[in-house]
Amino acid sequence: MGQKIAFASVYNFEPTEDILDKSFNGYRILPFHLFKDKYKGLVQYLQESNNWLIEPTVPSIPLKYILILEGDENTDVHKLSFRQVLNMFSNTIMYARLFKHGDIQLGTIFIAEVGRQPIRHPYHTRFECFMSSVPYEGYTMYPDIYTINQDEMNDFLGFVKQIEDVPDKKIESFFEALYFFDLAKNYHDISSRILNYVIFFERLFLTGTQELKFRLRSYLVFLLKDPSLTDFIDIIYDMRSNVAHSGEAAPADYRRKHKKRHKQELTMAQLDEYINRLDNVARQAARKVLDMIISGTVVNLQDFITQNNKQFFECLAKK
C-alpha cells in the first residue's frame, strides 16, 4: 500500500512557527515549499499528470500553506471515502471560523497517491473575491488574515472535541443553520455575504413570516446584550432587502437615502466595516447558541428558538 494523503490549499492563513509540521488530530500544517519537498514524489507525479494545484489566484491571496490529513490511530486515510474527506476538511474549516475571527479559506481538496489518479474537488472557487459588487472605484477589500498559535491551537482542539461529543440529533439543526454562516464566509463580495448572514440569523432565531426585522434585531440585542445592535441590524436588513430586489447591497437609491439621512456619502470603507461587524455578530450568536446546546441549557436548536420566543414575548408583555 503506497503513501496516500489528503490535503487542501489554505488561503488567508498565518499559523505561528510553533505549530508547523506538528500533528494534531491527524492533521498537519506545512508551508507550501516544505510540502513540495516532503512529498516530492507525489507532487512530481501530480504535476506530470496535470493534476497539480490548478486554481485561479489573485495577488491578494497567495498560497502559503497546505493543510494535510495524514490520519492517526483513529483515522486511516486509505479507508476514507472522498465524501468523508470533504466533510472532514469542511468541518475543520467551519470549526476554525467559529473559533475566532478571520477570512481563512480552503482551495482545492485532494486525495492523492503516487501512481493513482487523484480525486480532487474545488472547495472554494470564487477567487474573484475581494471585488465588491458595489460600484466604488479606488477601493480594495482585503481579507482579515486568520492567525493561530500553539495556545490557541490547544483551545481549538478542545473546542472541536466539545462539539463532536454532542449527539448528532441535538446538534444537527444547528449545523443546518450554520451552513449559511459558512457560506457567507466563502464569499467576499458584500451582497452575497449579507444575504447569507441574514439567512443564518433567520434559521437560528425565527419561525413564521411576520415582523422578521423587528424580531431578529430584538433577539440579537437580548442574546448578546448589546442595544447598539438595534440600529445596526436595521441597516443590515435594509441591505438584505436591497440584495433580494436589486442584487446590490447599496444600489444608487439606497446611497441617496443614506446621504440624505446622514449628510454624507456612503463609502466602501463603511460597507467594509459593516461586514466585519456582521461577521463578529454572527460568530458571537453562533457561539452563544452552541454553548447552550453543549451545556444542556437547551436540548437543541428548536428548543432554543422556543425558549427565545417565550422570553421575548414575556419581555414585551412587561412593557
Image (spheres, helix red, strand yellow):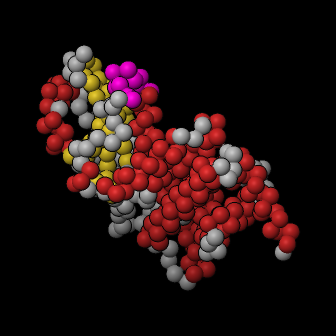
Residue 256 found in image quarter:
bottom right
Q: Which of 53 and 3 lies nearest the eye of the viewer? A: 3
Residue 63 shown left or right of residue 90 in the figure: left
Q: Residue at x 42, y 42 (%)?
A: 92
Q: Residue at x 33, y 21 (%)?
A: 78
User: What is the x, y in percent for residue 127?
Assistant: 35, 46
User: What is the x, y in percent for residue 122?
Assistant: 37, 35
Q: Quadrant of the C terminus?
A: bottom right
Magenta extent: 74-83
Q: Is residue 189 visible?
A: no
Q: Quadrant of the N terminus?
A: top left
User: What is the x, y in percent for residue 118?
Assistant: 29, 23
Residue 199 shown left or right of residue 71 in the figure: right
Q: Which of 260 and 239 lies nearest the eye of the viewer? A: 239
* Farthest residue, direction bottom: 263
Q: Which of 219 and 268 lies nearest the eye of the viewer? A: 219
Q: Is residue 142 above or below residue 262?
A: above
Q: Is residue 72 visible?
A: yes
Q: Residue at x 27, y 24 (%)?
A: 4
**Count of numbered circles in the view:** 0
